[in-house]
Image (cartoon, rainbow, N blue to C red):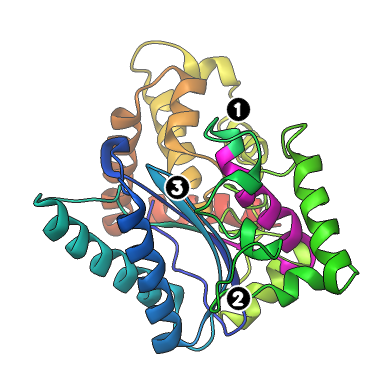
């Protein structure tokens, strides 16, 4: 399936994560971390975005970034490139430092900014590096609690959700973070919503994001509905599709089902393969053959379109 385009509009807030390649350390010492924070500051001065929180762990990092006109992709590409070049020069090594592209989930800041900042500040505790967020020097927690000064860090929007000001806000925030360490977060900040895996927010928020990003909103399709429509069209049951052998009717139904999975994004090929006792490569090959056939045979293309129309009703 083709990767969906990045979402961008001025004011968008993202939870960004980066991991070391093959889980290797991306920060070996205080010099590395200090350099990375300096590069964040330089990026803010150049691109005009805001950073609401950060945490630098030995093999990964997390940021909360609010963009202005410059898209997140450009901000992160420059940050990752500059730090990798410096790290490799400083430590006299070569090769990739980070594991592929960064991951970014666009979040509803009115609902999720405060608990997201808390979870990022708890990352060293969750990882067993410290017993308290206050003991970890390489996150924004100390700055939020008045124990450190990070001039480029933006805290005001998070404090607004504390509903206190001055020293009371600092104390209330620290207590709020400590309370979260007693149990796992009920929110998975590494995943988006069912409506769109790129976005953490309710349906109305997702609709608004898509409009601001000038993209078409397409609600996520239930894979059960897709399966039901294909089974009804071919007068089969799920056991038929999962049966061993090379029955042509069953194979055709599986190919259309896999193509619909790809087109709607309702679930992964891996999930479908597990369900139908087929490997992903065979399903993908069947889809490619069917797509090529549809370019020459109008009946094949028409059948696929009719199935799509039923799904979208």
| Quadrant of residue 298 within the rendered picture | bottom left
Q: Give how far across and how far down residue 61 sits, in percent.
A: 45, 52
Mark 2 neighbour density, 10 Å: few (under 14) some (14–19) many (20 or more): many
* Residue of label 1: 235
**Are dots 3 and 2 in contact, CB under 8 Å?**
no
| Quadrant of residue 180 within the rendered picture | top right
* Residue of label 2: 12
Q: Which label belongs to residue 261? A: none
Label 1 or label 3, whichever lies nearer to me, is 3
Residue at image point 30% right, 28% down: 282
Name the one closer to the observer, 63 or 135: 135
Give above or below for 262 relative to 206: above
Q: Main secondary structure of the magenta part?
A: helix
Q: Is residue 114 magenta?
A: yes
Give above or below for 137 relative to 236: below
Whether residue 99 is visible to the viewer of this picture, yes or no, is yes
Q: Which label belongs to residue 262? A: 3
């Amino acid at each position: 399936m083709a990767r969906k385009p990045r979402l961008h509009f001025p004011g968008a807030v993202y939870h960004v994560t980066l991991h070391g390649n093959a889980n290797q350390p991306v920060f070996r010492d205080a010099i590395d971390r200090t350099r990375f924070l300096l590069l964040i500051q330089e990026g803010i001065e150049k691109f005009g975005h805001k950073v609401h929180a950060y945490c630098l762990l030995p093999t990964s990092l997390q940021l909360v970034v609010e963009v202005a006109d410059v898209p997140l992709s450009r901000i992160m590409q420059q940050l990752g490139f500059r730090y990798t070049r410096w790290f490799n020069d400083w430590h006299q090594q070569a090769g990739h430092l980070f594991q592929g592209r960064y991951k970014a989930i666009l979040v509803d800041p009115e609902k999720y900014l405060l608990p997201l900042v808390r979870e990022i500040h708890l990352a060293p505790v969750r990882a067993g590096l410290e017993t308290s967020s206050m003991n970890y020097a390489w996150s924004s927690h100390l700055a939020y609690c008045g124990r450190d000064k990070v001039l480029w860090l933006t805290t005001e929007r998070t404090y607004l959700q504390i509903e206190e000001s001055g020293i009371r806000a600092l104390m209330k925030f620290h207590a709020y973070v400590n309370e979260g360490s007693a149990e796992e977060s009920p929110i998975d900040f590494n995943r988006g919503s069912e409506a769109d895996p790129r976005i953490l927010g309710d349906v109305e928020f997702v609709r608004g994001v898509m409009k601001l990003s000038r993209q078409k909103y397409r609600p996520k399709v239930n894979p059960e509905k897709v399966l039901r429509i294909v089974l009804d069209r071919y007068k089969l049951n799920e056991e038929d599709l999962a049966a061993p052998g090379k029955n042509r009717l069953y194979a055709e139904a599986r190919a259309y089902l896999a193509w619909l999975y790809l087109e709607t994004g309702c679930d992964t090929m891996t999930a479908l393969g597990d369900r139908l006792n087929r490997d992903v490569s065979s399903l993908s090959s069947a889809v490619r053959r069917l797509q090529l056939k549809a370019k020459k045979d109008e009946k094949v293309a028409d059948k696929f379109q009719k199935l799509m129309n039923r799904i979208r009703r």
